[in-house]
Amino acid sequence: MGVTERLAKFVVGLDYDDLPADVKELSKHLILDFIGVTLAGSLEPASSIVHKFVKELGDGSDARILGSGLRTSVTNAAFANGVMSHVLDYDDAWYWPAGHPSCTVIPLILALGEKLRLSGKEAIVAHVLGLEAHGKIGVAVQKSAPIETGWHGVGTFGTLGATAAAAKLLKLDVPQTTIAFGICASEAAGLAIQAGTMTKSFHAGNSARNGIVAAMLAKDGYTAHDNIIETYLGFADKFMGPDNYEIDEMAQDLGVTYYMLEPGVLVKRYPSCYSNQWALDTAMELVKEHSIRYEDVDSVKLGAPTEGVVLDNPEPKSGLAAKFSWQFSVALPIVDGEVNIDSFTDDKVNDPRIQDLMRRVKIVPNPERPRDNIFPMTIMLKDGRKLFKQLDFPKGHCNNPFTAEELAEKYKDCARRVLSPEQVDRSIDMVLNLEKLGDITELMDVLTV
């Protein structure tokens, strides 16, 4: 049996009762995190453009956009919510394959959930399947990370994950699901070079929409290659690169081990690329421990990887671009003494103090361990002192996870920007008890204004 068929059988056969308790609990926490960052993201300029785009299309009212409640088609709602979820770069992530798993999956779950009046249990199963399809295929990459081939995993692996979720919700059988994967492989796209622009978040919305399109077409008899993941010139060959993957490692132990648990999904403390979380956390801790002020700092040295996600970007030109700059991530906490959603703006990037300090941040490669996330930081003060710190894992990493209280605080900080206090509290309760929800529409009622 080929990889595509094995994955399709897993999608069709998995039921809610098959899921381990810790997988169910993690899924709910990730869904809560997704909703929070999407609500906050709905206020961004890119989201305003997408709202205008969806209104001008004007094709349907089966599903709603988070926050505004704008009604549109299922595919447009999935697209819009996907863009909004990723525009802040505050959504969950993982390193191998590099990418963000939930932002392509949950948008279509909410959209189809409204149209089909699906339950919370169905949403959890579809979410898990989407993440497992993404991770269990991507784990087979052997040499170069997918991002080093030029593809953005949100647009490639994310489309596979979205299709797995959509196929489950639309109740496709195994042959239909294999064809859905065949269709979605021709939809997958997304160039990694778009990091720092609005189009990076487009990849998330596009993948969510692609999953619905692929599953709906397959359900009605559309045809495609039926072993598209593993075949020569297929998905793995083109998006991972020839001789850069091990076919026997794809889709292994489906339902026995869960990729979302091990190696695990990474939740963000700061609205910035995950490779920046070490720099932000380390600088923030040094500032707090030693009461460092911008005026006290002579220079900073940051050790960093030389392969994979490399963010050596000393002159970001916008708030979006600053989310992909180690230099900005060092300078920001030192100058401001805090980091939050409002920190990554064009005005902040152009702050003369931040501009000055970024020029005095030296990135030191770690050639002996080029892929390891090791970020030793030394801050040299003008009085001659050298302050050193190295964190093994930033807050939110699966090896240093948020507590339930910390996750709820992040959610509240995001959601309060759009929802009333009553809606915020009610939505937390509904998501953390999602398995009791009979109709996703009830949740969407609380998440719109």
Image (spheres, rainbow, N blue to C red):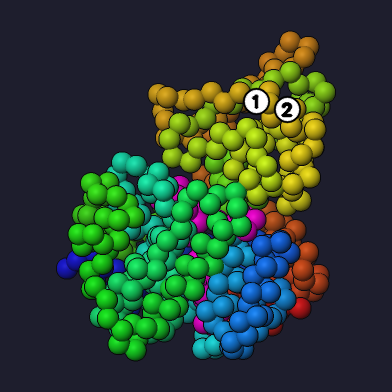
The amino acid marked with disc number 2 is Leu
Residue plotted at (77% across, 68% down) = 418
Residue 234 higher or lower than 243, as above or below: below
Q: Residues within 10 Å of mark 2 (few under 14, many from 20)?
A: many
Seen as rendered, the residue at the extreme front is 56
Residue plotted at (74% across, 48% down) = 345
Q: Position of residue 356 (x, y in %)?
A: 75, 27
Q: Residues within 10 Å of mark 1 (few under 14, many from 20)?
A: many
Is 385 in the magenta? no
Q: Tell me the magenta residue range.
A: 87-113
Identify the residue position indicated by label 1 in the image. Answer: 361
- In the rendering, which numbered label is found on residue 19? none
Are the residues at dot 1 and dot 2 in contact (C-beta closer than 8 Å)? yes
Q: Secondary structure at mark 1?
A: strand
184, 391: nearer the viewer: 184
Residue 266 visible within the image: no
In the rendered view, does 383 fall on the left or right side of 58?
right
Q: Position of residue 36 (x, y in %)?
A: 67, 64
Residue 297 higher or lower than 245, as above or below: above
- In the rendering, which numbered label is found on residue 357? 2
The residues tagged by marks 1 and 2 sit, at their Cα atoms, a distance apart of 7 Å
Residue 366 higher or lower than 192, as above or below: above
Q: Secondary structure at mark 2?
A: helix
Residue plotted at (46% across, 25% down) = 366
Residue plotted at (45% across, 49% down) = 98
Q: Position of residue 160 (x, y in %)?
A: 38, 66
In the rendered view, does 33 fall on the left or right side of 191?
right
Seen as rendered, the residue at the extreme left is 1
